[in-house]
Image (cartoon, rainbow, N blue to C red):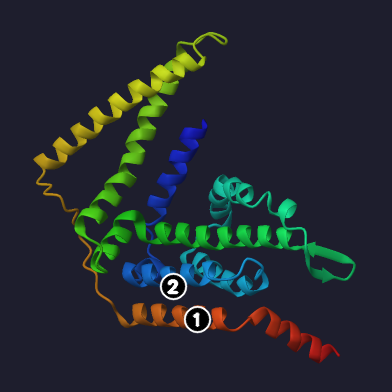
Amino acid sequence: MSAIESGMYQLGWLDQFSRGDTPLHRIDPRAKVLATFVFLVCVVSFDQYDLLALAPFALFPIALASQSGMPGRELWKRLAAVAPFAVLVGALNPFFDTEAVVQIGSVVISGGVLSWMTIIARFLLTTSVALILIATTGMAGVCAGLEKLGLPDVLSTQLLLLYRYLFVLAEEIMRMARARSLRSFGSKGMGPTVYASMLGHLLIRTVARAQRVYNAMSCRGFDGRVRTMRVLKMRRADWVFLAGWSAAFVVFRTVNISVLLGNLITGVLS
């Protein structure tokens, strides 16, 4: 399986998983979107050296994955696909910030290493929650929830169509890559000139394909708004989900649970 086909499979798997029927799948999209928003704001608001303070926030993605029945291996595969970006973002920190900030026994940790680990921890927390949100709600549900929360119709429709356009673009890329592979012998047809020509043809083919898709949607009554069969209604369980997790995030943000537990354990052992 090529890298493009693997990427398509991963995106398609998220859509397929969103059709499940678990308590988390049945939570109103607005409750999940708002809880995720509070989670993201709290996580990114920490200082660059507050690595331990981020630890309690791991409870949220773990609980969501467990409640939805999402296989941990599938989640890790998708995190690993984009992890190199997060690793590269802070890769130079240890070279510029060499001041020691933490000492554990004889091991001294510099500020650069600590901030690098904090960047990776933030990436794992925020990306895993975003993936679980899409996997348990679906992009159509997320856009419907955002629209109900006040996002303009045009933006929610554009966001949904952009997501769908990724599948159209990837399908055309797979066709062209397969055709190029069948017509290549050895290294012939693999140079940059061929790829530049393919990019031009790819733009023309995807624009033409998008136009045909739009014409088909217009023939079926599309008037600029994407309507879903599901009627969104906040129930008691949705309010409990939103209020409970939001309160927990505020507590995690204001109280350093990791240090508190560490002092408690140290006091008991001493």
Residue 31 image offset from top left, x and y in percent:
35, 73
* Residue at x 15% of width, y 37% of height: 216
N-terminal of the pair, mark 1 or mark 2, is 2
Q: Which of 261 and 59 is in front in this view?
A: 261
* Residue where numbered disc 1 is placed: 250
Q: Residues within 10 Å of mark 1 (few under 14, many from 20)?
A: few
Residue 215 image offset from top left, x and y in percent:
14, 36
Disc sitting over residue 38 in the figure: 2
Q: Which amino acid does label 2 sit on?
A: Val
Image position of 20 (left or right of 108): left
Q: Extreme right residue here?
A: 106
Q: Quadrant of residue 27?
A: bottom left
Image position of 158 (left or right of 11): left
Does residue 228 appear in this view? Answer: no
In the image, residue 204 above or below residue 30: above
Q: How crowded is mark 2: few (under 14 residues within 10 Å), some or many (20 or more)?
A: some
Q: Which of 155 and 46 is in front in this view?
A: 46
Q: Is mark 2 on a helix, strand or loop?
A: helix
Image position of 112 (left or right of 206): right
In the image, residue 262 above or below residue 74: below
Confirm or deny contact between disc 1 and disc 2 (CB under 8 A).
yes
Q: What element carries label 1?
A: helix
Quarter of the image with the C terminus is bottom right
* Residue at x 64% of width, y 63% of height: 118
Residue 154 image offset from top left, x and y in percent:
20, 54
In the image, residue 144 above or below residue 172: below
Q: What residue type is labelled 1?
A: Val
* Residue at x 67% of width, y 61% of height: 115
